[in-house]
Image (tube, grey):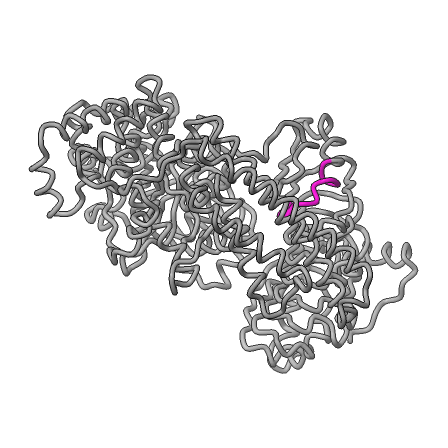
Amino acid sequence: MATGVLTLVQKLGSLVTDEVNYLLEVKPEVESLHNELMLMTAYLKDADAMHNKCERVKEWVRQLRELAFQAEDAIDVFVYQVMQKRRDGFVWKFTKYPKLLIDAHNLRRKIEDIKVKIQKLSDLKPTLEIHPFEEGNSSAQAHQLGTSGDKNFPYIDVVGLQSEAEELANLLMQEAPLGRFSVVSITGMGGLGKTTLARKIYNRGDVKRHFDCQAWVYISKEYKMRDVLYKIIEQVMVLSEAEKVALASMEAGVLETRLSDFLKEKKNYLFVLDDIWATEDWDRLKGSFPVPRNNQQCRVLLTTRDEGVARYADPIASPHKLQLLDEDKSLELFLQVIFKSPVDRDAEASLNEEMKDLAKKMVAKCDRLPLAIVVLGGLLSTRRRTVVAWKNVVDSVNWYLDSSNCHKALALSYVELPSHLKPCFLYFGLLPEDTEIQRERMIRLWVAEGFLEPRGNLRMEDVGGECLEELMQRNLIQVAKWKSNGEPESFILHDLLLNLATSEARKGDWIKGGLEMLKGLRELRVLGGEDGLMDIFGEALYRALANLVSLEVLYLQDYGIGGLLPSFSGHAHLYEINIVGCINELPGLPWSLTKLRLACTHLMEDMMVTLEKLPNLKELILDWHPYEGVVMRCSATGFPKLENLTLLYFDWLKYWVVEEGAMPNLRILEMNRLFGLKWVPGGLKHITTLQKLTLVMPKEFLERIKEGGEDWQKIKHIPSIIPWEVEIPEINAQHLDDMENRWFTRTGEVIPDDH
């Protein structure tokens, strides 16, 4: 893909114009490289469109991407070295520091070498026979899709569902009791429209009026009961922000009790469980719902691909089984997607026989599956409505499909995406199945990854919004929730399209086989577990982690290998690390780190001694048993740039000492379930930047922070203070004093004073 090159072009452009000027004496060479790549980008987008059709073009694109990554790595390392010197106050006159002179000379040589190789690739262009996009598929036209001013995105309905929605809605609302739960099931293969039908029923006015409360939950293959219960509670109860924070960290049993108590007062309620995979899932979910009483009506609308699951949930009632569309319905849906407005409907009626024949040929390739029809129709909706333009798509369909295969029809929709949208779509493939993501969050992630190209005077956030609109219009992403003003609030990806995004991403050049071959990897997520894989591949992974010096984001869960991690202090690009699972000690961490999360690490030594020395750390999350100690200290010069700090569920921490001068830029602090903590650290009163303090703590602690309490003076300057009372678990209450005695005996420390 062209993504790596386009991203580097943007980065180089920013560096060349940066007033801080980290490039120093190599600026002319970097500017020259920037210009070379700029000349290649337009041609590269055309090459990217042929990426899947020609192996020679595919190899050409791969080599250019590899050169772009080499240049990015070399420049990043040099800028990092300059930043280190400036941080120490050393770089005043460049010529006085021989090491930087040598580094600059080496960078010049690398850039010149890369430019020579780029020129060789450029000389190959005429032999590749790469042709520009036809006008109907140009990036410029694609850009216009998002700037038309049309914010009322139509909801594409699967034709013929109205009568089915009516029938199932009446079944849900009938008064007769149907056992513990009245279960109405919708079954069928993926892409038939099960969720669409369920959503149509869920949003009906008569259904909303009939039920006192209702909730919709996506059930993924690897769902967590706590998350399911929290999502239901969030929809049926009115919660303050403090209550949401507290509930989000509660265990499933507590949430189940909270939900049961609330629903006792309701007459009727409806739960939609979307996409259940196994009978065991139904047993777990059913067991967590309160038993209806006093003529209550608890209705469950269930969607599943497995008819056996539906019959298991209710052995008496027959599941509603969706079928593939017939030829007429398939064509009707296809044209409905292409012609969305009343004006377009007139155009639809005037289609000549040749275009109708072309439409039938494309629909036939979708195997009558609604999802494939909608996605392929979305592709046609962006093209000019001419015979020539539609014939080009038919030719693409015939090339891409070896047989009548709807899944390959979905893949064609990706192949035909403009180059600027491909990385945006693939990024959805990083999400777990059935994950709903907020619009603003996805845009921020795209911006951080450098996927978005500047467009005139638009902010990058607006460019991201337009890209989402384009993907919506192509029906590659679905709106999960809408705002009251008619704009999307969050998105979700159908699992067939998620599989598409994942499979296309795997075709990228960063997977070359073997952990130790991933030299250019930027992001790595390692999800261990109890399947023994870490015992087999652990040593290779350890070596690979040490050598992946291009990493930018690292996520390690249940890593194993005896809790040992290699040092990351030489990973100059690494800005985010997440470690979940027990480790013996903190690894060496790079100065480039801006975000760190440690969860369930059970560290025995005070991690703050190491973490507070990270000069660029802005966000630190320590949660769920990160530390087994009793004393934790933040020194006067620690955490110079830290802005957000979360401390959650420390079992035995009693004394947190914050010296004056520590964390001078802290804005948000959360102290959550620090069950043994004696006091609010006195050093907080010196942090004038602190804007929000969340305290989810035992009653005795909260008494100290009330106005007039022992710790009130330490926090009274903070504009927003959110207290929430929780109980101390019995096991903690029993062993707090014993753990304190053991700690001071082992370490030889004395009980610290509050600062």
Instruction: From this view, report whether residue 466 is shown above or below residue 278.
Output: below
Estimate the x, y position of residue 141 in percent, counting from the top left: 29, 48
Residue found at x 88% / y 59%? 744
From the viewer's perspective, tell me whether residue 480 is left or right of residue 240. Answer: left
From the viewer's perspective, tell me whether residue 176 is left or right of residue 502. Answer: left
Instruction: From this view, report whether residue 201 is shown above or below residue 481.
Output: above
Estimate the x, y position of residue 155 in percent, counting from the top left: 24, 45
From the viewer's perspective, tell me whether residue 153 is left or right of residue 129. Answer: left
Numbered disc total? 0
Instruction: From this view, report whether residue 362 is shown above or below residue 177.
Output: above
Does residue 234 show up magenta in the picture?
no
Estimate the x, y position of residue 3 in percent, counting from the top left: 49, 44
Does residue 548 show up magenta in the picture?
yes
- The picture quadrant where one finds residue 525 is top right
Is residue 541 visible in the rendered image? The answer is yes
Is residue 284 visible in the rendered image? The answer is no
From the viewer's perspective, tell me whether residue 13 is left or right of residue 382. Answer: right
Nearest to the observer: residue 660 or residue 588: 588
Nearest to the observer: residue 560 or residue 278: 560
Estimate the x, y position of residue 420 in percent, counting from the top left: 41, 46
Residue found at x 75% / y 59%? 611
Residue found at x 91% / y 57%? 745
Q: Quadrant of the C terminus?
A: bottom right
Magenta range is 544-554
